[in-house]
Image (spheres, coloured by chain):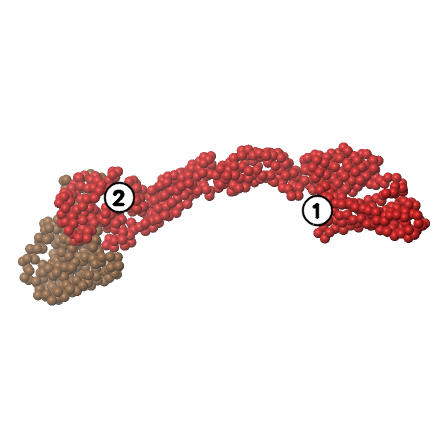
Amino acid sequence: MRMVLVSVVTPFLLLAQMRPQTPELRQEAAREIAQLSRQLRFTDTPSAQRYRAVREEVTAKIQARVDQYIGSTVKPASLDPSVVRQDLDFLLTPESFDPEYSGPPFVAAGEAGNARSLIVAYMLVRGGTAVNDSFVTIRGYSGVNGHFQLVTSNSVDFEGYGLFAAELSSPSPAEQWILVWGPRFGFNGTKLRTRVYAFDGHAFRTVWNPRDVLNGKVIVAGNGFSVEHLDEQHYYVEGVPPYTLHDDYTVSQKGIEQTASHHLSE
Amino acid sequence: MRTTAVQRALPRLIMIGMLSCAPGFAQYATSYATHYFSSDGRTLYATTTTSGSMNTSAGYTHDYYAYVSISGPPGSSGSTGGGLVSSGWVPAASVGTAQSTGQISTVVDGSYMISTDGYAYCSDVGEFMNDQPPPQGPIVDSPVINMAGVVDSSTQQPYGYVGTSGTLSIYGLWLTADGQDPSPTVSSDDSNLQLSAPSYAGDQQLNVPYTIKPGARNGSHSIYVTTTYGQSNPGTFGVYDETPVITSISPSAFAAGNSYSVTISGSHFGSVCPTVSISGAGNSTFTASGPCSDTSVQGTAAFDVNATGPSATLTLTSSGYGSGFLPVPGQSNQGSKSVIVYPLTVTQSPSIINLSTGDKNTAITVSVIPSTTSFTPTFSSGLLRNPNSSCSANLDFTSNPGTGSVNETVTAGAAGCSGVFSTTAYVGARSATGATQVTVPPQILIQFLVGEASGQTAPADMSQPAIAVSARNRFGDASFPGGTTATYQAVIIPSQYYGASNTTPNGVQPEMANSVGVFSGTTGAVVQNAKCYWSPTAAQWATIQQALSSQTAAFPANVGAPSCWAGQPRQIVYKTSVAANTRGGSYAGAPAFLFLQQIPQSNVPAVVQIP
């Protein structure tokens, strides 16, 4: 996670002057999204009922508005992921969240499907104050006629979870690979979900779908990543330390391969 | 009264006759009697009228008399009367009438006799009498038994009992033919009503020993007296069955729900085995099982478990001596006696049961006093409450028979359902003193505690109650999944709790007891308003301890706290009675659980400590 943040911040500083000159469009979209987002929060039971009545509809409107903004402002030929990320951060400012449980909007550019491609992932904060009834969407765009057009999305796997994401080195030049993870909101402790998706310019393919782990932490490094998590068998069943497992994974033509697993000394 | 040539007229029930002076005097006299009942039938009136008419020479005297007497059975009273109406020397033509009237109450049952008399006296006309030629000496006729003239000499009652002996007193006229037949024959219409030769014989009374043997026909019998002058009218004597009398019952005290061999003693039970019933003790029964006699019956008395005491009545109904049972009118064929009945005492234990829907070996012990009682208990359960649960359980009980005490297994279903029940055992309709409170917590609560904190089971460790209460605190909070539904089944779900995936099927301890405490509400707000928790590592705990010590308002970062109220004012609650994590290792020394609660503002300590 920390490495991802570093890799994001540096390009952002370098490319700040390249932001598209669409302040009016951005302001208008931000205002509309902010207005819609207010319907996605509640403070008591009556407002919770109203929220649940409009949740899907309003969420869809926000997604559509983001898609519209990307389609109208982001040009495949001059795609700058950092600018897009900055814009999304601005558009979704009302939905900012504690960075310990979720990251900022994720943007990754590529050439999936032999065309300019774009992966965007972001989380909408919904629900009450105690638990984020989050909506997490991972969206794939493809450059068509000078614009990015939404071609696929996955809004199911991380619903109710936080969102962190990182690019992985794709073993296929026609695909973009991303690592996505996040903790389950409201869970007592930390329950971490991790997925690896491949985008071929048309659809997302789930490359890696492990079960959720407890007290998990993801570390992205080199051509792979590591997951540290609670060894549930040791902790809950055997009661014998050490309790923390460190698993290393690499990206290969076969997919995600576990290269090592060991307990951390305590 | 003059005494010459006087002949009393014979008594007649109704007499109409003619009196006449001697022929040639052209005089005559008549006498007649009448009787009638009052309109209500309760009084009998009788009148004798004597009328005479003389036409003779002066110097003759004349008297006209009329007399009536009415007698009845013992206990009745009547009147007699008579009088001289006309007397004196007869004038040339003398006409006179004498009349006498009597009456008697007919309230007493029995036979009544009216005797009337009337005569006229002519001093010189010779004797005369009504409708009978002058007899030549004493008048003798066939025996006549008076109405109600046959009684037992001892009781003076016109009946006797089967199986008894005694002496009949027979009253009447010419019973010995005016002494001419000193040994009259007395007979009955039933050979089992045996009559002996009179022990005393007078013309108006006989004393006859009798025996009423079993088999004698019940009811009215005819008694006849036969002399050399013939057979009498039938006298009436009743044969009845004597009311049975119970003098003792052994044993005389009984307990509900038990059976006893019983001997009933007394008299007049009959030669046919009587029946015995038990009243005042529910559906208790008596079944004759042994030989019976006129004085004893044996059988088995089975007392209903529902008998409440303190007494019951055994009633013996005689079947007589072979000809059915006919009591004296107004009397009964039943004899009764009261006995002591102790109600059954039913108890049950224990008074409190904690039960999982997966438990199959939990029992309620039902005991009865007396301990000799055989019974099969039943149970009645009422749902007292079922807070915050999606479904109510049902209780089922085995039905094992036992004597004195029996264990009945109680189970709850359907799986996962819950409730707090009050259960009462019954033996028959007799309920146990006290009840058993059966608490069935939602199974998900037990599973949750097993999954989350099965290692935190030290007696003083509040880990399990604390995390269960934190889950309970989510009820009513729409922010949490299931909070609006506010049931354990809706709140404790795998997306929120690791332990919600546990599949423990039964009521392991101490998770069961802790679940019951939280479910029933006996475990209060032991973690304030915390709704989330986690198990910190030792390193995370060190950071938190620093915040606790410094009383900083800044929420410590990277301490593993769950995302509840992330970005909102929130507070870590350290409950000192939650023991250190028993897993050790990287968790050694840290409390097994820390809790999170929302706070209204962020300028208060980020970590607080509670007992």
Circle 1 residue: B107
Q: Residue at x 62, y 38 (%)?
A: B244
Q: Residues within 10 Å of mark 2 (few under 14, many from 20)?
A: many
**Circle 1: residue type:** Val
Q: Secondary structure at mark 2?
A: helix
Label 1 sits on a secondary structure element that is loop
Which of B288 and B30 lies nearest the eye of the viewer? B30
Occupied quadrant, residue A174: bottom left
Cα distance between the residues tagged 1 and 2: 92 Å
Mark 1 Cα shell of 10 Å, populated few (<14), some (14-19), many (≥20): few
- Give how far across and how far down residue B266 sits, in percent: 60, 34
Count the marks. 2
The residue at 85%/40% (across/down) is B139
- Residue A244 shows up from this direction: no
In the image, B191: left or right of A104?
Answer: right
Residue B496 x/y as whole percent: 23, 50
Looking at the image, which is closer to me, B223 or B407?
Answer: B223
Q: Residue at x 87, y 48 (%)?
A: B87
x and y percentages locating residue B320 in the rendered image: 64, 39
| In this picture, residue A207 sits left or right of residue B41 | left
Label 2 marks which chain's residue?
B
Chain bearing tag 1 is: B
Q: Is residue B386 visible?
A: yes
Chain B color in figure:
red
Viewer-proximal residue among B601 and B51: B51
Q: Which sits earlier in the primary sequence, circle 1 or circle 2?
A: 1
Position of residue A187 measured from the top left corner of the image (x, y, whole percent) = 21, 49
Q: State the brown chain.
A: A
Q: Amino acid at mark 2?
A: Pro
The residue where tag 2 is placed is B465
Q: Residue at x 72, y 43 (%)?
A: B76
Q: Quadrant of the N terminus of chain B?
A: top right
